Amino acid sequence: MSPSSARVSAVGVVGAGAVGQAVCGALVMSGLCGRLLLTSRMSEQTAALAADLDDMRVGLGSPVRPLTCHPTDLMDCEAVVVTLRTGFVNTCRTDIRMGGAAANASAVRALGAGLRGYSGTVLVVTNPVDLMARAFAEVSGCRRVFGIGSNLDSVRYRGALARLLNVTPRAVRGHVIGEHGDGAVVCASSTTVNAQPVPIPLQQVRDELATRPGRIRAGIGRTRSGPAGAVASALRLTLGLSDGVTELSAPWQGGWIGIPLRFTHGRPVACLPALDDSEQRQFAAAHHKLVTAYRALHGHATEAIAVPAQERTP
């Protein structure tokens, strides 16, 4: 199906920072929607981003028209992408993505309250993504909320393995599931290359997955293009524009965790690969960690009197 025919009416993006900008650029290039509605608490920045994206639209001949909007206008979108990030100092040396949990949760919950009853699809990019996707879903009541973390982890895994084995990334079939963070689980036992099982240089792969985000942040300040690609590919599946399998954070046995989902006409079905004993233990540990972290985060939220003004989302 060509981009010109595989299109929905409108997609909204919340957040006009580095990741939001990259996501918007990818969506203009993708041609998957007629209107791209942008909103953030920085109105001047959002207007400037819309103007810049409009120049891209004209230059590419893209059908995607970028527009600023009020948050309530997002209710009419087929999908909303959440890229907001609040200001905080991350002092974590391990579990880095967990560093902004309390700060970002306030803004994500405020957004969820404003979009209560939304019936479309929501993709959450804000970290820690497994917790933020659950927080948004529970506050908003939206039944189609997904986090994109394991999608990006799996892309990095397939790319790293392709480089190590000197094959094309398309030849690699494999998943990274669990937490988007230190609890990620590499499904090496079910990975194939050119449809055949192969020995996986697991430690080399894990080292690459652990260090790659830090190298990107050190060089350009924030990962942005990778998440943008994950969003664009996931939207095609979640909106029913194409069918296939992707790894997303979703409800699983009382928590939210990254798992492979098979989408058919936009309808997801979990399709976990067979896990060996080590992978099963890692997956169970990641699930326990995320459930425990969310309980702690929920307790923090119930103690809060109000969302700080600088963390509110319009």
Image (cartoon, grey):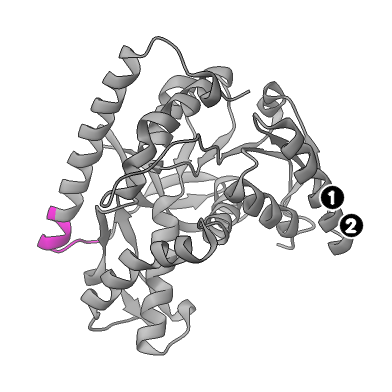
Q: Which residue is drawn at 23% across and 75% down?
A: 202
Quarter of the image holding residue 134?
A: top left
According to the picture, the residue beneath numbered tag 2 turns out to be: 58
Q: Residue at x 57, y 57 (%)?
A: 233
Q: Please tell me whether residue 241 is drawn above or below residue 250 in the rendered image.
A: below
Q: Please tell me whether residue 162 is drawn above or below residue 11 in the rendered image.
A: below
- Give amino acid for label 1: Asp
Dot 1, how many residues are within 10 Å of its Cα: few (below 14), some (14-19), or many (20+)?
Answer: some
Q: Tell whether position 289 is magenta.
A: no
**Taking 178 as reference, is 292 left or right?**
left
Q: Is the magenta stretch mostly helix, strand or loop?
A: helix
- Tell me which segment is drawn in magenta: 274-281
- Give amino acid for label 2: Val
Estimate the x, y position of residue 184 in percent, counting from the top left: 28, 56
**Taking 117 as reference, is 193 left or right?**
left
Q: Do the residues labelled 1 and 2 touch (CB within 8 Å)?
A: yes
Q: Please tell me whether residue 165 is drawn above or below residue 147 in the rendered image.
A: below
**Residue reaching furthest to the top:** 305
